[in-house]
Amino acid sequence: MSFYGIVDGSESSLKHFLAQLPGVDQVGAEARAAMLATRSIKTTSKRWAIDTAITMVDLTTLEGADTAGKVRALCSKAVRPDPTDSTVPSVGAVCVYNDMVAIARTHLDSIGGQHVPVAAVSTAFPSGRASMEVKIQDTQDAIDAGAAEIDMVIDRGAFLSGQFGLVFDEIVKIREVCGDRAHLKVIFETGELVTYENVRKASYLAMLAGADFIKTSTGKVAPAATPPVVLVMLEAVRDFYLMTNRRIGVKPAGGIRNTKDAIKQLVLVNETAGPEWLTPELFRIGASALLNDLLMQRMKMDDGYYASPNYVTID
Amino acid sequence: MATTPKKPVARLEVKKTYKLYINGAFPRSESGRVYEVVSSKGISVANPSLASRKDLRDAVVAARAAQSGWAKATAYNRGQILYRIAEMLEGRTDQLVTEITLATGVTPKKAHDEVLAAIDRWVWYAGWSDKLSAAFGATNPVSGPYYNFTIPEPQGVIAVAPAESFLSFIDAIAPAIVSGNTVVALVPGSAAIAAMTFAEVLATSDLPAGVINILTGSHDELAPWTASHMDIDGFDISGISKKKRADLKVAGAENLKRIHHFEGALSPTRIYAFMEAKTVWHPIGV
Amino acid sequence: MTFEYAPAPESRSIVDIKAKYGHFIDGKFVTGKNHFATINPATEEVLSQLALGGASDVDKAVAAAQKAYTKTWSKLSGKERGKYLYRIARILQERAREFAVLETLDNGKPIRETRDIDIPLVAAHFFYHAGWADKLDYAGLGKSPQPHGVAGQIIPWNFPLLMLAWKVAPALATGNTVVLKPAETTSLTALLFAQVCQEAELPDGVVNIVTGDGSTGSAIVKHPGIHKIAFTGSTEVGKKIARAIAGTEKKATLELGGKGANVVFDDAPIDEAVEGIVNGIFFNQGHVCCAGSRLILQEGIADEFIEKLKVRMSKIRVGDPLDKNTDLGAINSREQLLKIQELAGVGDSEGAERWSPACNLSAKGFWFAPTIFTGVTQAHRIAREEIFGPVLSILTFRTPQEAIEKANNTPFGLSAGVWSEKGSRILWATQQLRAGVVWANTFNKFDPASPFGGYKESGWGREGGKHGLSAYLKEGK
């Protein structure tokens, strides 16, 4: 593996690279994110943003209580978010635990949702605390069951204790398992990494190890996808593209509950990484409640009056 | 037992129930006890809660939980919140005057003067929040290539035992919280009445829950428990009689509580008494 | 896929601009003479007619201020003075949107900035100083320091209402009364402020506003009834004032020009530094005395940094100041635009390399694209002279000492910026820099509690904080 010719796969090469990355000033980064949040997105641009956001949603259910019935309902919603309005696009993907992948894939295919991929969380999600063998098997099972996307978690304990080589090697191994059958998202759990510098380091580490997407959170820990965290990750993919000519995707997950939040994310993408990233190929939003708020806002824009939850379906 | 007037009235007044004010809510004392406040004419005014040591315990927990958030607010923000409380108090002037007149027996004119003085003092203290570092901080010219600065910080949870008047109550709590401390106030006797109206103002203000907690009742009962409480950082005993102060200081020595009493009002020393000074060194070099 | 932002205009229906204004003297709006037009620099639309204050108008204003001082203001306790200031602060907060829109129309700066920065700071200045009014014993000037009497205040066009707040709030808090002349291109928010004084029931004559031009300002400076002068504006006019008062007992504070150096070390937090450089020179269209108009960049990271700067600059939205998404508004006047164009032309002819992102500038109104010059040295005029526009001159340095030498090599001394992640280096640099305000890892931050003012030809005295009070007080016992 060449790792873009930037590191040689050894821990020392990786640590050296990570150590020379510029630091992030917390106050400055938060101020930049806050300024971008004041952008006023109205009328035609708001309507475009809502539809774009819908296509980027990874509609998610990751609960211990998930059942086949729940997953099927989620899949129906994913394909046709508003049964009364066929102009509403399908979402970006469905995201489930790997023992639900087969159910999801089958159901999607049976309702005309062949175009909606199934993403599976993997590698002992959400904690990441298990042996490498278990993590590899976890991933393999999901792909065999039909997952086209794998959302893995990094070993935060290893990261926080400076074992970057270990974190790196795990990603490399899972990337191998994915091969060309699935794209790999790497989840950092930024709430546990705490500092923006750690987020920057994790971003480069994951991209060099072969990530197709870098992802903020499992959605089980707060804070999750705060604007400054997403800003730092977008800066990383922007700069990585300049270094390697490869665009890596970004997925914020957790805490994006309404249309305003989603639009703020799109503005961040637009003014940081650039408009090339404004596609589900390169930007996804991990969410569940968000979708209905997007639908209600869409209705309000089309109808001219405020909507009610009674007019959107639950999944 | 006081007597109540027996004249029939055209419209019966909806009277207020007096409880404690802890963590932004109004619970009764866990002991279920009350005490009677009687007007100078022998009329029963109210039955405020008689706070117990367990209420004190709960109030300290609330004050501690609220303290770091209150201290982290910008000085400007704290000043704004306190100023708005003054605006609301101004609006309640008449109510406070009526209550103080009834509960303490002073003339309405004196009560009015007292309320206006209290509001003005509250505003005076509010204006200090963003000036404390200028007044009590410093950069220090140490002999060496170091940048050295001293910054005043709040101590934490401060208990206050003011004398039995609204003005003393205000004089005690304002200087304690303006710097970012949180407060547990032991309000004695008839002063409970106006203090609880003040609590209603706090409950509708932007002051976060737990920043000010009010326990109405007996100094004799609660002050010793307060003085020995290991999670209280400072204690203003201005309202405790002179001969009882020494024992409280002995009890407070267990966690080196900062115990003070003050004679005058409107002095920044009342603020600074419940602050600490932190001095920081940082090398200067390329 | 492009994400175009649809127009998001703030409504102007909230403001009510009269066709013609006079002056505000002794608590009343009075008629004036010799009216001249004031325009919206983004559209060249005439907004109103302003009066040119003459010697007799200034006379009346000073007399009113003197009477108010003697009969009313000096007799009030600090506590009561403070309450007037609290009232003014509150009304400013209530009418914040109205003031923000009016300031944007009159000045040309983006509504996002008036709404989020200028107007909130204005209210904060009044709040902060309200709290000092009855605490002057603690201002470090002894017991019971006394005011001077009548202050003559002349303010510039770049932050019209904020500069008014910086002048009026401390003057009133310390017990002085005021005759204030706003800039001729931006007097409307000052005149609206006069309404606020009336709403707050401020005693007649405590604040007086006389509009006009340089001659009006001169009449104020020279008036024998003015005891203290506060001026913010160009160094050139500041020197004129210093000469004019030389033989008198008048006190003056001057807040003048600058050519601030923004020093970026190679261990800077790069993305935030890029943001800081952009904010430092393009905030308020570069019409900022403390602008970071020189970027002094460590040579080793220069190419990479300038590339990032260019990418960031291409995201700057230039356009209608009333649009909530506009980052860079209009240049305040044709006169100022010509100055900027002239000096930018000098930069070209001196051999520096100019770059701007592609901008769609409207034909009407006064516009200048955000611009950088690379290959600039201290010997270039564009590294020495204040351009007061969105133009950044970029120089490089090799060692920290060289950076400081270049930063200090100027007759100005208002502001400087330092970008580094190393604390000791920041403190070392701030110790060496000859500037009244040093920002480390940030820029253009203002607070009523933070003293502001310059070294050398950037002026005399400080505004804000405890330090800012001393200009308005005589030392007590």
Image (spheres, rainbow, N blue to C red):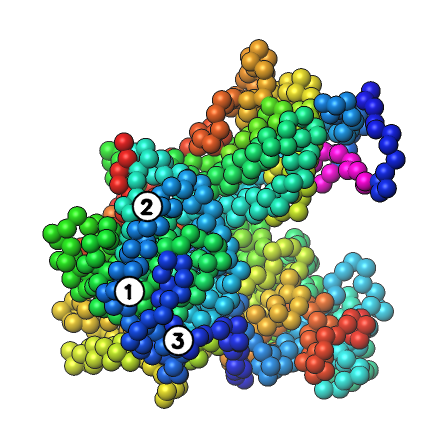
For marks 2 and 3, give the CA distance. Answer: 32 Å
Residue B35 appears anywhere in the view: no
Q: Quadrant of residue C57?
A: bottom left
Crowding at label 3, few (<14), some or many (≥20) Cα neighbours within 10 Å?
some
Circle nearer the viewer, 1 or 3: 1
Same chain? Circles 1 and 3: yes
Circle nearer the viewer, 2 or 3: 2
Residue A50 place in picture, x, y as percent: 64, 78
Viewed as shown, does residue B80 lie left or right of C303?
right
Which amino acid, mark 3?
A: Lys
Q: Toward the viewer: B190 or A21?
A: B190
For marks 1 and 2, give the CA distance. Answer: 20 Å
Main SS of the magenta segment? loop
- Chain letter for mark 1: C
Q: Toward the viewer: B25 or B70?
A: B25
| Sooner in the amino-acid sequence: mark 1 or mark 3 | 3
**Residues at circles 1 and 3 in contact by the CB criterion of under 8 Å:** no
Crowding at label 1, few (<14), some or many (≥20) Cα neighbours within 10 Å?
many
Q: In the picture shown, does residue C389 fall above or below B126?
A: below
**Which of the numbered marks, if any, corresponds to residue C57?**
1
In the picture as drawn, the residue positioned furthest to the left comes out as C247
Find the magenta span and give its range: B13-26
- Chain letter for mark 3: C
**Which of the numbered marks, if any, corresponds to residue C20?**
3
> For numbered disc 3, what is the local secondary structure?
loop
Residue B45 appears anywhere in the view: yes
Badge 2 is on which residue?
A: C70
B22 falls in the magenta region:
yes
Q: Residue at x 77, y 80 (%)?
A: A82
Q: In the picture shown, does residue B180 fall above or below C55?
A: above
